[in-house]
């Protein structure tokens, strides 16, 4: 399963009813959760006890893989963030819909992989310690570079800032297209040029 060693597999169901009752979710949260999620199970635990070749990290002592079966592929991200808040553990989420899987992990922000065939979806255990393994998993899922000079956190923040700039550029370009006054149009273009320089375009 996901290319993980057999010793890590636990297959422990996590019932929605248990989650609802334990964390006293509001009706609106229950309904939103139930609309997206069919069932859940903790399918693997990665730790030095289950993978003896891995050393315990300074920060990461172990992590789980939570398989979430979805009712439809377009899900509300708030449900995954809710799970992250409710379960204070490092977790790799394997979201499944039919024969497709998307991996997610929360690290500074929610990182999401592309959807791919479940059979070819793997969670790589690359590194000598659990800290290294976790960082590499975040990099793979988030499309980041674990070998870069910038830390994973810095890359996430920089990418977020760039995406924000791109949204601002798009909004300004839209305004510039409909602006009738020449002076205002020029001002908008100057703002666009400045933001494009910041975004490295």
Image (cartoon, helix red, strand yellow):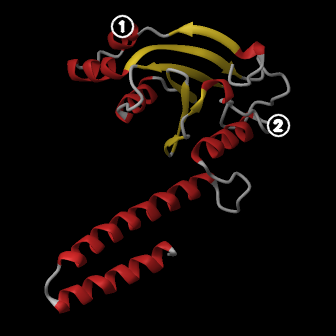
Q: Report x, y in % for residue 132.
A: 74, 41
Task: Classify residue 176 as left or right of residue 60.
Answer: left
Residue 49 at least partly seen: no
Which label belongs to residue 125?
Answer: none
Q: Nearer the viewer, residue 133 or 172?
A: 172
Which label belongs to residue 128?
Answer: 2
Task: Classify residue 65 as left or right of residue 22.
Answer: right
Disc 2 to disc 1, how far (Cα)?
38 Å
Query: Looking at the image, how many numbered discs can be counted on the residues?
Result: 2
Q: Quadrant of the N terminus?
A: top right
Q: Residue at x 78, y 37 (%)?
A: 126
Q: Nearer the viewer, residue 189 or 119?
A: 119
Secondary structure at numbered mark 2: loop
Crowding at dot 1, Cα within 10 Å, few <14 / some 14-19 / many 20+, comes out as few
Secondary structure at numbered mark 1: helix
Q: Nearer the viewer, residue 8 or 113?
A: 113
Residue 40 at least partly seen: yes
Vertical placement of 36 versus 126: above or below?
Answer: above
Q: Residue at x 18, y 91 (%)?
A: 182
Q: Earlier in the sequence, mark 2 or mark 1?
A: 1
Vertical placement of 189 versus 157: above or below?
Answer: below
Q: Report x, y in % for residue 2.
A: 68, 24
Outermost bottom residue:
183
**Which residue corresponds to mark 1?**
17
Q: Residue at x 74, y 22 (%)?
A: 4
Vertical placement of 199 versus 69: above or below?
Answer: below
* Residue 141 picture quarter: top right
Task: Classify residue 36 as left or right of residue 124.
Answer: left
């Amino acid at each position: 399963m996901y290319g993980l060693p057999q010793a890590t597999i636990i297959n422990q169901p996590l019932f929605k009813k248990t989650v609802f009752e334990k964390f006293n979710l509001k009706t609106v949260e229950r309904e939103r959760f139930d609309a997206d999620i069919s069932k859940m199970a903790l399918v693997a635990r990665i730790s030095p006890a289950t993978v003896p070749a891995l050393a315990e990290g300074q920060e990461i002592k172990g992590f789980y893989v939570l398989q979430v079966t979805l009712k439809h592929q377009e899900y509300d991200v708030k449900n995954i963030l809710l799970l992250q808040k409710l379960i204070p553990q490092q977790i790799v989420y394997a979201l499944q819909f039919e024969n497709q899987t998307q991996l997610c992990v929360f690290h500074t922000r929610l990182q999401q992989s592309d959807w791919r065939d479940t059979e070819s979806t793997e969670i790589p255990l690359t590194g000598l310690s659990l800290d290294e393994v976790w960082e590499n998993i975040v990099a793979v899922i988030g499309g980041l570079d674990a070998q870069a000079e910038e830390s994973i956190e810095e890359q996430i923040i920089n990418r977020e800032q760039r995406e924000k700039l791109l949204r601002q550029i798009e909004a300004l370009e839209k305004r510039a297209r409909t602006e009738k006054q020449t002076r205002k149009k020029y001002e908008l273009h100057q703002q666009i040029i400045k933001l494009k320089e910041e975004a490295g375009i």
